[in-house]
Amino acid sequence: MNQNSNVKVSPSYGIDRPEEIAASFQLPAEVVEFRDLARKIVREELLPLEQEFLPHPGHAYGLKEVLSLKAVFPAAVVDRLIKISRDTGFWYLLVPESHGGSGLSMLARAAVLEEFMYTAVPFPFANVPNILYHCTGTQAEKYLKPVIEGEKTTSFAQTEPNAGSDPGGMMQTRAVRDGTGWILNGTKMWISMAAESDFLLVQAVTDSAKRQRGGITMFLVDRNNPGLKIEEPGIRTWLGPRPAQYIVHFDDCRVGDDSVLGEVGKGFTLGQTWLTIHDRLMRGPYALGKMQRALDMSVEYAKQRVTFGKPISERQAIQWKLVDMYVDIKALRALVYEIASRADRGEDVRAEAAMVKLCASDWGTRTLDHAIQVHGAMGESLELPLTLFYRYVRHTQIGGGTSEIQRHLIARKLLA
Ligand SMILES: Cc1cc2nc3c(=O)[nH]c(=O)nc-3n(C[C@H](O)[C@H](O)[C@H](O)COP(=O)(O)OP(=O)(O)OC[C@H]3O[C@@H](n4cnc5c(N)ncnc54)[C@H](O)[C@@H]3O)c2cc1C
């Protein structure tokens, strides 16, 4: 580790940040308690595993937490983390009380998630797309419950080769009624971990005149449906050593009527519900954890690294980078807490969640960029999580709706 430098960089350095830097907003006592427990787990259980995780060829962006852990660590390590998650209740962090979950507010979830995002090592928990709670009857037994218990995984298939930013207008995948079921034809692209999923949440046009206004339906399609074919290997990106995104073909893919999630024609709205929370609001804590880690590491490194007879922390050029990172973190955290609290009050936060995503991805990218620069050559070392964090956060300027599209959503509200 760090052989060319006199600076000591331990695997867990940067974590003992002054509370003042971490403190913000008056969180309710029970949220602070839960957040602090998450912080303790990160320090004691996850950070010591990071040096093993980072260089491992098995990890891939988009792999769900448990799959990602299994790809890197022996079963005993994975089982231990799952046990901690279940014993503490974190397993059900994102599951509503009505389904045996924590019942935690969006604000609490944001505060806790930020902690787990402080390290590259994923913490296992029930990663349930919120739209799956629309499952009814046998759907709940077949799809929802196994996902909650970690026995099945799913992926979200909206994007197509010619339909990214404008899925409602450009989607070509169609579902046509056939007796008591439907036949799907079309191609989806960039679908994260499709090949590792047990079933896919697939959007298809069911009424081409209405499209996103009542003409797109969401289907639950089993991975082993003979009409569903996934191109292997997947698409390689800069996000990890393994491909995790896939092209998926539907070739006269037959599904029953009981495969419709929610109502026929309401699938586009369902997709937006998923994106608003998962890909927009929760992108805030997702970036914040990484940004805070980057700042903590940078402060510590800058105080130790000496050039021209002084630590670089005494140079204004470095101080300004640290300050810019600090200000971005403070501002983003305040925004996340405000919008999460408003979501908890039942407000429509679609445009505000877009604002969170925009700030998280833009500010997150520049914060990680500063951290890499402050670290000099060490910033580019794959022994540190900085370049991985940079790629993950930079990706969110594209994945789940680009920064331009977030601005478009915000402008629509601003100018309405
Ligand atoms: C790693 C990765 C994982 C992904 N995972 C999934 C997944 O699991 N499921 C899924 O369905 N999709 C997934 N995607 C797809 C992703 O959501 C789309 O790539 C994204 O929405 C952008 O679409 P596009 O690539 O077609 O860009 P385009 O729509 O072709 O846009 C190209 C550029 O033009 C800009 N642009 C487009 N329209 C406008 C406009 N009106 N005004 C101004 N600028 C505009 C865009 O912002 C962008 O900069 C993933 C993508 C990646 C890279």
Image: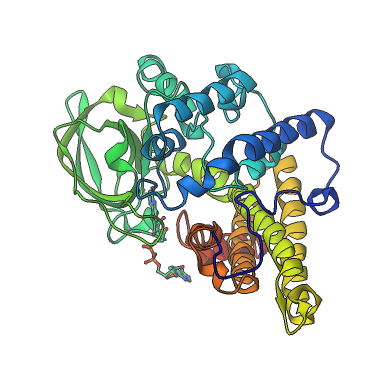
When the figure is inspected, residue 288 is found, relative to residue 416, above or below; the finding is: above
Q: Identify which residue, 327 or 343, lies in the foreground.
A: 327
- Please state if 197 lies on the left or on the right of 304 as rendered: left
Q: Position of residue 167 (x, y in %)?
A: 38, 55
Q: Hey, which quadrant is residue 36 in on the image?
A: top right
Of the pair 198 and 338, the residue shown nearer to us:
198
Kindly identify the residue that appears in the image at 78 percent across and 30 percent down: 33
Which image quarter is the C terminus in? bottom right
301 or 235: nearer the viewer:
301
* Quadrant of picture, ligand 1: bottom left
At 45% from the left and 43% from the top, the residue drawn is 271
Q: Count how many numbered circles sit on residues in the image.
A: 0
> What residue lies at 35% left-to-right and 19% top-to-bottom?
142
Seen at 55% across and 70% down, the residue is 4
Q: Indicate the position of residue 211 as horizontal and vertical percent values.
A: 36, 49
- Residue 10 is left or right of residue 54, and the answer is right
Q: Position of residue 183 (x, y in %)?
A: 18, 35
Q: Is residue 209 visible?
A: no
Residue 165 point in image, percent of width and height: 42, 61
Left or right: where 271 falls relative to 353:
left
Q: Quadrant of the N terminus?
A: bottom right
Kindly tell me whether residue 179 is visible in this rendering: yes
- The structure's colour scheme is rainbow
